[in-house]
Amino acid sequence: MAVSIKEVAKLAGVSVATVSNVLNDTKNVRSETKEKVEIAVKQLNYRINPLARNFRKGQSKVIGFVVSDLSNYFFQNVAIGLEQSLASYGYHVALMDSKESKANEIENVRNLLASSVDGLVLAISGEDCSYLHLILENHDVPVVFVDRKPLGFTSDMVLSTNMEGAYLGVKQLIQKGHEKIGFLTSRNDSTMKERIDGYRQAHSEAGLKVNENYIMTGDNSVSISQSQLLHGISYTQTRELIEGGEVTALFAGNNLSSIGVYNYLREANIRVPEEIAFMTFDDSFWLSMTTPSISAVKQDPDTIGSVAGQLVYERISDKTNSQPDKIVRIPTRLVLRHSM
């Protein structure tokens, strides 16, 4: 059974308040009294509860991270960067998965606030975040968004250079001689719209007209397992474009889409890059293990998480809340392999 602070006070012959002042260094205590308390602590093997102490100080030292889809290993890497960053400030991360459901996201935020987290980092499921105004009315905690832009609520954001990354990738395909390039994605959110803008920019710069039929997006549906992604919407999209007989290259909008694209090409025995070139936005470990290996626009999720941790800590430390909202863009880069 854990030793209580009352037992320490009794053995030392002082008040509970005095023991608290010694342990938390909140008030000056005479050296002989301090020595009595320290001896009692040692004899009773008393252990300070850091969580309880932080609550008394009005801090939990916990940051809530609500993830739109934890099955997406991009967000797993964001979480790693966030945890490492916050650990350097003495904070921990409470991770919750919304499974691409706005209802789950709202419930997750409510539960974290009820647990008295000191801040929130959100990878949102849907763009409408106006609900936060009501939920945060009685909770003075900072919020940092990662990966996707919110609507209806303004706060700090950490995003990739989505448009620039897609532009560089599609430009590379065009320079390889491809003029009919399909863009496939399982989602249709602000992030994907930026990547489509990059796709359009590369075409415009090259003097090529965009064929809208080559741009195929999803409907932001609920999270599904990676085994289901093998024959999911991007698999169907790829089949439609290939059967149309026009496109000579495919650009997948994110790593989840690339699973369906690659699986269709493999099952249909379509040779890459001899019959069709292929590139994806998001680099993943398996892309270098395929034959041929697949080119990608590489994001830096660890840095996204790390910067988000830094921003939320800065907001907690800035009691005046005087700084304007920040949008930090983390650079992307091309990783060229043998699929184009």
Image (cartoon, rainbow, N blue to C red):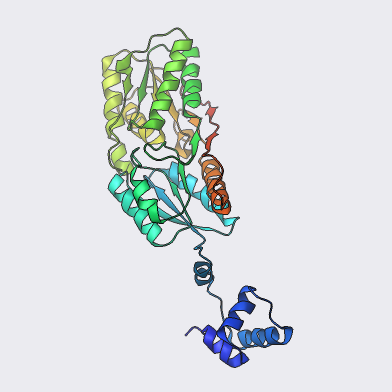
Q: Is residue 338 visible?
A: no
Q: Quadrant of residue 91?
A: bottom right
Closest to the observer, 6 or 146: 6
Q: Residue at x 33, y 39 (%)?
A: 126
Q: Residue at x 54, y 83 (%)?
A: 5
Q: Residue at x 42, y 36 (%)?
A: 149
Closest to the observer, 329 or 292: 329
In the image, residue 196 lies at what x, y percent?
40, 23
In the image, residue 29 lies at what x, y percent?
68, 81
Rendered position, 212 above or below 98: above
Q: Is residue 79 visible?
A: yes
Q: Residue at x 57, y 82 (%)?
A: 17
Rendered position, 154 above or below 272: below
- Left of 189 or right of it: where is 64? right
Rendered position, 224 above or below 3: above
In the image, residue 228 lies at what x, y percent?
28, 40
Count of labels in the image = 0
Outermost right residue: 31
Q: Quadrant of residue 268?
A: top left
In the image, residue 130 lies at what x, y percent?
34, 42
